[in-house]
Image (cartoon, rainbow, N blue to C red):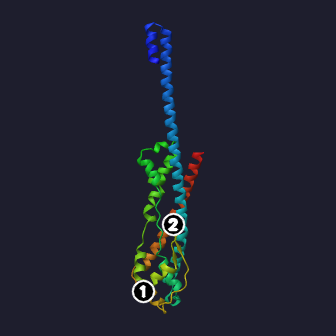
Amino acid sequence: MLLRRVIEHVRTQNWTAVGLDFVIVVVGVFIGIQVSNWNDARADERRARDYLERIRGDLLGDARSLNVRRKFNETVITYGDRALAYAEADERDRRPDWPTLLAFFQASQLFPFASNNATFDELRSAGELGLIKNQDLRTALAQYYVTGSGAQADYILKYIPDYRETIRGLTPSVVTRYIWDRCHDEAGFEVQTLIECPALDLERQEQAILEGYLAHPTMLSELRFWMSTLDTVQVLLAINEGVARELAAEIDRELE
């Protein structure tokens, strides 16, 4: 329709009309491009918002998991301190009993942590990090997931101590089964609880078992190293929890 009008105006040499037709075409193309760009921008904005909401959920999930592990480790450290107090005491002051035996075993417990970085990895692998317009937020997320404390702490937060293998190898299987059955509760992937359970009737074998622990050439040094490592783990867990919560709050402000 417009093309026929232009041809007709050229044929009749109506240059004013030709100019108006040209302007209409240019304006139409411009508006079309702008509408397309606006639609693309709106689509990018929706995708960015979706990614940020998902990352926010991941971060809050990390914060909860870190807090759970910190509380769990507090219990493990309490058991470890009790075991160390017994091992480092004068032999005449040692009182072999079930709580002490339990302390040695429970001090070997661990609760590894791995950050939930699925959404961030999806965003990065798709080459769409630029959807997050806030440069500071984008950098902070990269530091948390790739180069920051979360990534650097990954090894120590998944560390499996030699003490764990040593003490469990020295513990009679009947004791191990009893502890798992009566002194430990695991109600799901993110729930693990150590319980002060009733004493197992070992017919006064506690002393022999504890002496076996102490006779092992590396057990005590491994326990000391594990307790020292847990102190570091606790610091890292607290730092990462704080960072995760602050990043989630920053995303809240960005979404507003």
Q: Residue at x 52, y 77 (%)?
A: 79
* Number of numbered discs overlaid on the protein picture: 2
Q: CA distance from mark 1 to mark 2?
A: 34 Å
* Mark number displayed over residue 124: none
- Say whether residue 134 is visible: no
Image quadrant where one finds the C terminus: top right
Q: Residue at x 44, y 58 (%)?
A: 152
Using the image, determine if residue 204 lies above or below residue 106.
below
Q: Which residue is mark 2?
A: 190
For the residue marked with disc 1, what is the amino acid?
Gly
**Where on the picture, by quarter, is residue 156?**
bottom left
Q: Which residue is mark 1?
A: 212
Q: Position of residue 122 (x, y in %)?
A: 44, 50
Return the residue nearer the eye: 166 or 94: 166
**Mark 2 or mark 1, which is nearer the start of the sequence?**
2
Residue closest to the far bottom:
203
Q: Nearer the viewer, mark 1 or mark 2?
A: 2
Q: Position of residue 135 (x, y in %)?
A: 51, 43
For the residue marked with disc 2, what is the amino acid?
Glu
Which element carries disc 1, helix, strand or loop? helix
**Where on the picture, by quarter, is residue 12?**
top left
Q: Position of residue 181 (x, y in %)?
A: 49, 79
**Would you say the residues marked 1 and 2 are in contact, meaning their CB atoms lie under 8 Å apart?**
no
Q: Residues within 10 Å of mark 2 (few under 14, many from 20)?
A: few
Return the residue nearer the eye: 241 or 132: 132
Using the image, determine if residue 74 lies above or below residue 100.
above
Q: Position of residue 230 (x, y in %)?
A: 49, 69
